[in-house]
Amino acid sequence: MPTAAYRLPPGPNTPKLLNGLTFLVARNAMVRRLQRRYGDVLTMQMPGFGTMVLVMRPDLVKQVYTAKADVLHGGKNPLGEILGPGSLFSMDEDRHLQERRMLLPPFHGERMRSYEAIIEEEALREMASWPEGVEFASIGSFQTITLRIILRAVFGAEGRELAELERLLPPLTTLGQRLVTIPILRRDWGRRSPGARWKRMHARYRRLADTLVEQHLADPDLGERIDILALMLRAQLEDGGEVDKADLADELLTLLVAGHETTASALAWTVERLRRHPEILRRLEDEARGEENALRLATAEEVLRVRPVINATGRVVMKPFELGEWLVPPGSSIVTGIAPVHHDDRFHARAERFEPDRYVGRKPDTYAWIPFGGGLRRCLGAAFAQFEIDVVLRTLLRSFELQATSEPGERESFRGVAFAPSKGGAAVVRRRPLGQAEPESAALMTALNS
Ligand code: HEM
């Protein structure tokens, strides 16, 4: 197709670097200003993205998320560069589809629910050390909980390996994110340089991941194991293929990076929003006394709408792509603005208000509620994350009284992968008498406290 046929939406012609800098310091204000001036779809130059088309309207978001796999590839997700070729983030088209098909089942339905005991146990274990009556940043605890849940449910780790991975992975992923942001740091400039540290830490990670694979392969009960590594191994063995330890290690690390900080941040936002909406909190406490969870699920959906932890998703155009009245050329990037769509009164009544009831008994709109992105690359762990939030929040409500506050809401702060509340979801709690917790939880809590 001749270049002249391409039609890009209008947008500012300010230089790439300036756009990048403005974006870093005033992302929301910049996007709002551009949307007012150019409308719901606009083009701009962005460092790392080149020609970038920003989409902020559900009908256009739908076109992006329903495009074929050979027309739009996964975005230039910088994490893919350090996670390796065996990561879903690095795959497209057939290989991507095949990998997703293999990974999806345990993240849904009954298989997913088999992780409930692990989730509740990890929540109770961590919450046992919460102080009473003094403010603390809940996000640290939620990170510990979500990390241990992934290490047990996904990696199938226990004992020494669980403890070592728990120590190694937070600094490893933090360093990895830094290297992604500043690529020059990836070089090995000598023993103490970030590049050399990354190599050492990653080699240690590989040794631990390989040990886990070997332990799984030697386990006579591999067929009965419910962790996701076991499932991946069984799929590889059934295919008659060789077990590719490097690919397995890449994918496990991907699931950890994608699923740990995101879910922890969403939980911290839940605490932050609920402390400022005591009437919802009271109703949730009532609900948590029984087995219903309609309001709790709706609350999690509303938190992810008003405070999405990932603000945008990206795609790369591989073949000419029709977007509304525009024809976008290959090589461009398409970014869907999650936050702009979520915060727009045209798509959500009283969009700035926190009103979980809008989702009680009603599913959010597929293309106006997009905290997990959409289409072929929609978050693989979306259902798992929502289940995890539900069980952790239920455990919190049953074990503690969360104290309301009249302080202004916490601001957004970027933590490498996700946007989290700036004070880490500051919490003040009082422990409930054990009698109010479910009998099994009460027994576990007593054991953990003793
Ligand atoms: C509240 C928690 C979470 C949020 C808000 C979230 C959000 C997202 C978003 C926005 C994407 C990009 C989707 C797109 O490009 O259309 C994504 C991708 C992904 N997420 Fe999540 N995520 C969460 C939790 C998890 C969990 C718990 C896991 C797994 C343990 C996970 C695994 C993944 C993977 C593997 C991808 C890449 C999918 C692909 O490229 O095919 N996420 N997530």
Image: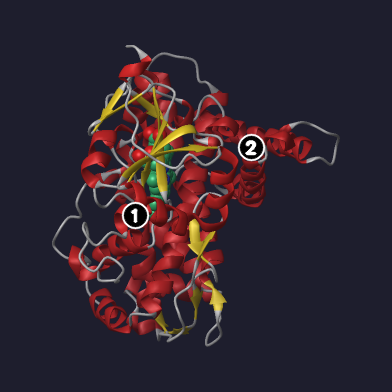
Q: In this view, does 65 lie to the left or right of 307?
A: left
Residue 409 coordinates in the image, percent (x, y): 44, 75
Dot 2 surroundings within 10 Å: few (below 14), some, or many (20 or more)?
many
Q: How far is mark 1 from mark 2, CA to CA? A: 51 Å
Extreme-left residue of the structure: 361
Examine the rendered structure and indicate whether residue 307 appears above or below residue 256. below
178 or 393, which is in the foreground? 178
> Which SS class for mark 2?
helix
State the quadrant of the N terminus. Answer: top left
Dot 1 surroundings within 10 Å: few (below 14), some, or many (20 or more)?
few
Residue 69 coordinates in the image, percent (x, y): 31, 23
Res 36 label: 1
Res 208 label: 2
Q: What residue type is labelled 1?
A: Arg
> Which SS class for mark 1?
helix
200 or 110, which is in the foreground? 200
Between label 1 and label 2, give the one nearer the viewer. Answer: 1
Quadrant housing residue 103: top left
Q: Who's the residue at 52% across and 53% down the image?
A: 147
Residue 150 coordinates in the image, percent (x, y): 48, 48
- Ligand 1's quadrant is top left
Q: Who's the residue at 50% across and 41% down the image?
A: 155
Q: Which amino acid does label 2 sit on?
A: Leu
Could one spot residue 156 in this view of the protein?
Answer: no
Q: How many labels does the image show?
A: 2
Q: Is residue 129 left or right of residue 258?
A: right
Residue 432 coordinates in the image, percent (x, y): 40, 85
Q: Who's the residue at 30% across and 57% down the image?
A: 342
State the quadrant of the C terminus. Answer: bottom right
148 or 303, which is in the foreground? 303
Examine the rendered structure and indicate whether residue 73 appears above or below residue 303. above
Q: Who's the residue at 51% across and 44% down the image?
A: 256
